[in-house]
Image (tube, rainbow, N blue to C red):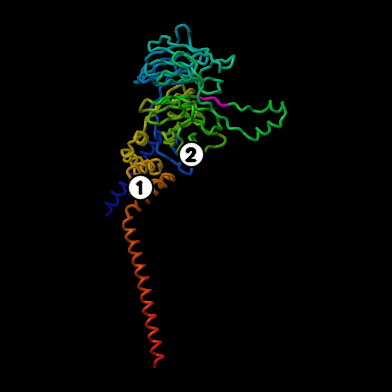
Amino acid sequence: MMRIKAMVSAIVMASVLFTTAWINVVHASTPYEAYNYNYWEEAVASPAAFVPSRTVGGSDLGIEPFLEPNDMVIAPSGNIYVADTGNKRIVVIRPDWSLDRIIDSVEGIGAFGTVSGLYVDEDETLYIADSGLGKLIVLNKDGSVKLIIDNPQSDIIAAGFKFTPTKVAVDDAKRMYVVASGVFEGIMQFDTDGEFLGYIGTNEVKRDYYEIIWRLFSTKEQRSQMVLFIPTEFSNLDIDHKGFVYATNIDLNSPTPIKRLNPSGEDVLKRFGYFHVKGDIRFRASVGPSIFIDIKYLGDGIYSALDSNQGRIFTYDAEGNLLFIYGMHANQNGTFKTPVAVEYDGVNQLVLDRAKANIHVFKPTMFGELVLEASRLHYNGYSEEAVPVWQQVLDLNSNYDIAYIGIGRSLVMSKRNEEAIFYFKQGMERDQYSVAYKRYRREEMKEQFGTIMTTIVIAAVMIIGLMIWRKVRSKRQGRTATYSAGRDQAL
């Protein structure tokens, strides 16, 4: 008996030690606290979707360390282009993290000024937004100059306008979308020849109506001291496979810090989640809300936005559901000081840190892989195939509401409304719950219609028969009573 107790104690102790070691390993690989928000907008713990894998700087490539890098882009070939702004160069890195080449000058221009934005298209054409030189430089794959835009002309551009491009993106039709400093009309659009086409996606300003009324009764001197209703600037942009522009702005009070602009410049971003697509829902007043400075489209409706305020990456699906959050400001490996760009190589996410002068590489965990896979399946119409994947997500995180909702939607499409009701209730999806409940109630009515109608008919026949029987009985009783009364009188 004593031997059995000793063996049990040893097994329990080993399990405790193993669990503790495993927890320590997980925490060691995730220096930040992973979390998400539930229906009540409460921050709840969540498994990490991405964990630090490695960091890469200039010295790791055998060159001079990066100095204040400002942007990064991954080409379709897998090459990584880094705007090493402080060193006035562009560093090209191969997918195996070896140095490919360094671009430090342009024929006919010379050295770079301040490279602040990069983009590479399918042809490996490189687009460089040089805010220092005030030029948008387009280079062919071999490094030769294809196009330079430095003084756009148009009737809608104000006289004396100084072109200062900061970010650039290009669609499949080779139209160039440029975020320029000091431009409040929207994102500048150019054709393949560099001709200015116009602005798209002007940021609307939320007006203070008290101030509007005050302006009506204020003096000229008072009005001159008031803040003007000037739209805010965009901070960054990316293009999806349909040619829609994902853009971020830096307005702290904006209800739409992320937009998805169609060719007409209208914001068509879906916001069907529990809360607005704006990063952190709750934050300390001393810290402030999320400030997005970069955005990356991951494909299949999924996109990640980089919050420079707290050093976090927020990833959303096509319907505006917040999938996961990771990252923070700190000094450990895998944390940031001044993050400026986020990229995606198809598997890993890369974050460029200006202050640390390196690239942080994050690899997905099993939880992150499953969430992305299920979201992609749902986006592409394979909701039924997504169900077992969502089930695996729930095995890792039973509080992941989006998984319940995803399973519920698939069940509704399969006309399994009774089961869908349970999952929508677990995921606090009220609208979909109502739809499933109405459909379930309609199905039950159809299924039981014959029984119900038969019951009603039988009940009606029985009631009518009872009424007839009572009437006949009443008449018989009346005749009996009359006969008895007459006989009594005769006697």
Q: Residue furthest bottom?
A: 491
Quadrant (top left/top right/bottom left/bottom right) for the C terminus: bottom left
What number is the disc on residue 225?
A: none
Question: In the image, residue 325 lies at what x, y percent?
Answer: 44, 34
Q: Quadrant of residue 296?
A: top left
Q: Nearer the viewer, residue 224 or 88?
A: 224
Write the residue at 32% across / 53% down: 447
First in sequence: mark 1 vs mark 2: 2
What number is the disc on residue 275?
A: 2
The residues tagged by marks 1 and 2 sit, at their Cα atoms, a distance apart of 26 Å
Can residue 461 be seen by looking at this rendering?
Answer: yes
Query: Taking 287 as reference, is 469 left or right?
Result: left
Amino acid at pointer 1: Asn
Question: Which residue does the numbered mark 1 point to in the structure image?
Answer: 417
Q: Relative to residue 320, is residue 93 depicted above or below?
A: above
Question: In the image, residue 405 lies at what x, y percent?
Answer: 39, 42
Q: Relative to residue 287, is residue 93 depicted above or below?
A: above
Q: Which residues are magenta?
A: 231-235
Q: Quadrant of residue 407?
A: top left
Q: Secondary structure at mark 2?
A: loop
Q: Secondary structure at mark 1?
A: helix
Q: Nearer the viewer, residue 471 or 14?
A: 471
Please check the rendered image and state whether residue 278 is part of the magenta-colored stretch, yes or no.
Answer: no
Q: Nearer the viewer, residue 229 or 490?
A: 490
